[in-house]
Amino acid sequence: MAFILDAERDAGAFARYAAYLEAQCAQFPPLAYELATSDWYFDARDHRCPHDGWLESAQLVETAGALALTVRLRAAYHDGTIELHYPGIVSYAFEGTAVERGHRDWRYDELRVDAHGRLEHEIEWSGTAT
């Protein structure tokens, strides 16, 4: 179930997502919950927010059968970088359409917990939007 990433995204999407986060608080890894509910993460005026950031790299590292992913963004204000690290990956998917000019801007994202209690992070890029 998507909230912000719903194809019919409307003005109430963020409020529904906030209610989802609150209802699922106990299921979330603590640091992911803290990030998703922080006052800056979805505030595009805050220089730490990934919105409008540009993908610099996505690196998968496999060590002794364990996968980790690190995503590095150029911050939207071009005054630094943002790095997200995902240890213990159990599945991943990259899907891109219309990326001949790159991913372009990080538009929206959601952190959710799947039916097995695992964290999902879905990102919508402006270069892949249809």
Image: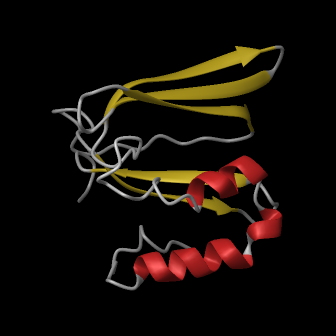
Q: Is residue 17 left or right of residue 90?
A: left
Question: Residue at 45% across / 54% down in the picture?
Answer: 40
Compared with 65, 24 (above or below) is: below
Question: Residue at 72% across / 79% down in the picture?
Answer: 23
Question: Residue at 48% across / 74% down in the picture?
Answer: 3
Could you say where residue 32 lies in the image, as x and y percent from the top left?
67, 51
The residue most toward the left is 101
Could you say where residue 71 lies in the image, as x and y percent from the top left?
49, 29
Compared with 93, 78 (above or below) is: above
Compared with 41, 13 (above or below) is: below
Dividing the picture into quarters, in which one does residue 79 lie? top left
Residue sitting nearer the eye, 53 or 88 = 53
Could you say where residue 55 lies in the image, as x and y percent from the top left?
34, 31
Could you say where residue 94 lies in the image, as x and y percent from the top left?
47, 40
Compared with 85, 127 (above or below) is: below
**Quadrant (top left, top right, bottom left, bottom right) of the C terminus:** bottom left
Dividing the picture into quarters, in which one does residue 27 lie? bottom right
